[in-house]
Image: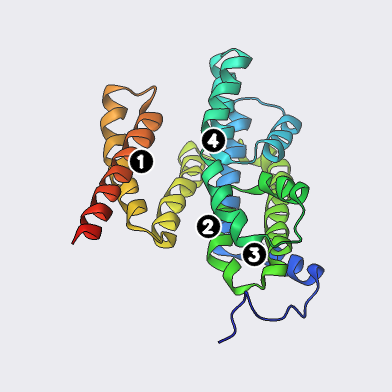
């Protein structure tokens, strides 16, 4: 039976790049764009110049990291502290890159190209790619992901610039709801696209611990919930695998 991996590639790289661009009209991309409208309202209320917001959108890209950066700016944190906070937030992208690259590269893919497109790996792009890329011939997967990731990034840079002036007049509840769409979508998408039970465990334990640490250690709640929840889920999965192997 012929699969996307073994099927002959009769299409050009440009074709697959354009197919990837069409992903801009998918539900994940639309939700992310609505979330960036909320982010524009957040930055407008914080009186951050629109050119800086647009630059931030393209260079930092991941939305949670930008929120942390803006929060650090508003709190008057030292630039080194802001850098560390954003870096720690973005470390979570490393496993996503590590999981995605083997799915899209082939023997002819240059390392420099993979390094460039890895900038566009964030949760929306990662979930979309992991769901769709197996239907694309391997030789076209890098172009497919680049088409989606680059288009999504550039579109949101332009979107933030266009709506920046208008969103400052939004009621706070509207801006908050738009902004809240992203974490809700992230959780549901990761749950649906998960392929191993350890991911379900990590999400469940992390959510429960997130509520606990929000009460007892609000400054480190996400960090502690992620580290402890992920570690407990990994340990439980390891123990269960060993038990199943011994039966």
Marks counted in the figure total: 4
Dot placed on the residue nearer the N-terminal end, 4 or 2: 4
> Would you say the residues marked 3 and 2 are in contact, meaning their CB atoms lie under 8 Å apart?
no
Q: To which residue does mark 1 refer?
A: 230
Dot placed on the residue nearer the N-terminal end, 3 or 4: 3
| Disc 1 from disc 2: Cα separation | 19 Å
Residue occupying image coordinates x 52% and y 29%: 88
Image colouring: rainbow
Q: Nearer the viewer, mark 3 or mark 2?
A: 2
For numbered disc 3, what is the local secondary structure? helix
Q: To which residue does mark 4 refer?
A: 91
Residue occupying image coordinates x 58% and y 27%: 69
For numbered disc 4, what is the local secondary structure? loop
| Disc 1 from disc 4: Cα separation | 14 Å
Q: Is residue 86 above or below residue 132?
A: above
Q: Nearer the viewer, mark 4 or mark 2?
A: 4
The outermost residue toward the left is 247
Dot placed on the residue nearer the N-terminal end, 1 or 4: 4
Q: Residue 127 got which mark? A: 2
Residue occupying image coordinates x 59% and y 41%: 62
Quadrant showing the N terminus:
bottom right
Dot placed on the residue nearer the N-terminal end, 3 or 1: 3
| Disc 3 from disc 4: Cα separation | 26 Å
């Amino acid at each position: 039976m012929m699969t996307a991996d073994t099927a002959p590639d009769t299409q050009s790289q440009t074709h697959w790049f354009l197919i990837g661009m069409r992903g801009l009209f998918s539900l994940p991309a639309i939700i992310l764009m609505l979330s960036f409208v909320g982010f524009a309202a957040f930055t407008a209320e914080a009186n951050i110049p629109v050119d800086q917001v647009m630059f931030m959108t393209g260079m930092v890209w991941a939305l949670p990291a930008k929120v942390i950066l803006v929060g650090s700016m508003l709190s008057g944190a030292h630039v080194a502290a802001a850098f560390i906070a954003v870096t720690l937030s973005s470390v979570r992208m490393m496993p996503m890159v590590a999981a995605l690259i083997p799915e899209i590269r082939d023997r002819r893919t240059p390392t420099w190209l993979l390094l460039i497109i890895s900038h566009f790996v964030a949760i929306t792009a990662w979930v979309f790619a992991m769901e769709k890329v197996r239907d694309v011939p391997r030789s076209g997967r890098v172009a497919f992901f680049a088409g989606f990731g680059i288009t999504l990034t550039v579109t949101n840079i332009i979107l933030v610039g266009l709506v920046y002036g208008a969103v400052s007049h939004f009621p706070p509840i509207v801006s908050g709801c738009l902004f809240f769409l992203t974490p809700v979508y992230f959780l549901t998408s990761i749950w649906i696209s998960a392929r191993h039970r350890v991911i379900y465990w990590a999400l469940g334990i992390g959510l429960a611990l997130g509520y606990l640490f929000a009460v007892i250690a609000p400054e480190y709640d996400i960090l502690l919930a992620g580290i402890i929840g992920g570690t407990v889920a990994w340990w439980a999965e390891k123990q269960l695998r060993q038990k199943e192997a011994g039966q």
